Image: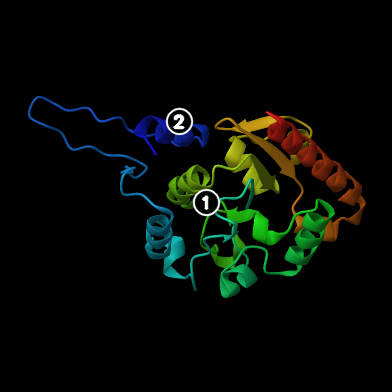
Amino acid sequence: MDNATRLQYLAAMGIDVWVPRYAEEGAEVQAQAPVIDSQEDSWEALNAEMRACQQCTLSEARQQVVIGSGNPRADWLWVTEAPSLADEQQGMPFADEAGELLTEMLRAMQLNRDEIFITHIVKCRPTEDHDPKVAELNACTPFLVRQVNFIQPKIIIAVGRIAAHQLLQSKASLGELRESSHEFSGIPLVVMYHPAYLLRTLSKKREAWQDMQRALSLFSKQQQQ
């Protein structure tokens, strides 16, 4: 990834990066996101960095880092909130009961887990399953940016309120975000209800189907371009 593209992605995520300014005798440069050497960066290097990351307090209590699962060259990228306990134990997103509903949703869209990629906005499970804090989001944002760059999806699905707010840097209601058109760094983005919410609120499943149809229609248009 060239530096200009990296800065564009980070800006889209709401992460401020200090641009180097050198004094006459040199100055120490600080940045809130790592500088990426595009010649050395790779999917394997990224995964290794995520597994070894200790940039926030979540690293202190984690069982393992949940990188994501599926096809790393997928057309569809699904981004959800933080890993659950089941996700952490099994090392994959949607390893709990909500994952069973997600699998059925994908089947209804004529998709399966092997042909999409699923990841989280933070890669470690927050203690007591709290919503990710700003420091935790900032630590993981460069990892997510690099995942997007490597995968180069044709469409991104923001699954649930927390993921939608982070990806879009918005505090609008999920209802408003679901019914609007979005992009993340030029990639079409659709907001959907989280399967865990749908399990608790059966009355919303019809709206979830509408979200799925909206995503399929948008993806079809992308395919035709």
Q: How far apart are labels 1 and 2 at the CA level?
A: 23 Å
Residue 199, picture quadrant: bottom right
Please tell me which residue is depicted at 63% across the width and 34% down the height of the picture.
Answer: 170
Dot 2: what SS?
A: helix
Q: Note whether residue 173 is visible.
A: no
Q: Nearer the viewer, residue 61 or 111?
A: 111
Between discs 1 and 2, the one toward the N terminus: 2
Residue 133, label in figure: 1
Is residue 138 rendered to the left or right of residue 216?
Answer: left
Q: Amino acid at mark 1?
A: Lys
- The residue at which mark 2 appears reads as 8
For residue 174, side relative to residue 6 (left or right): right
Q: Residue furthest top?
A: 24
Comparing labels 1 and 2, the label whose residue is closer to the camera: 2
Amino acid marked by disc 2: Gln
Badge 1 vs badge 2, beta-carbon distance below 8 Å: no
167 shown above or below 86: above
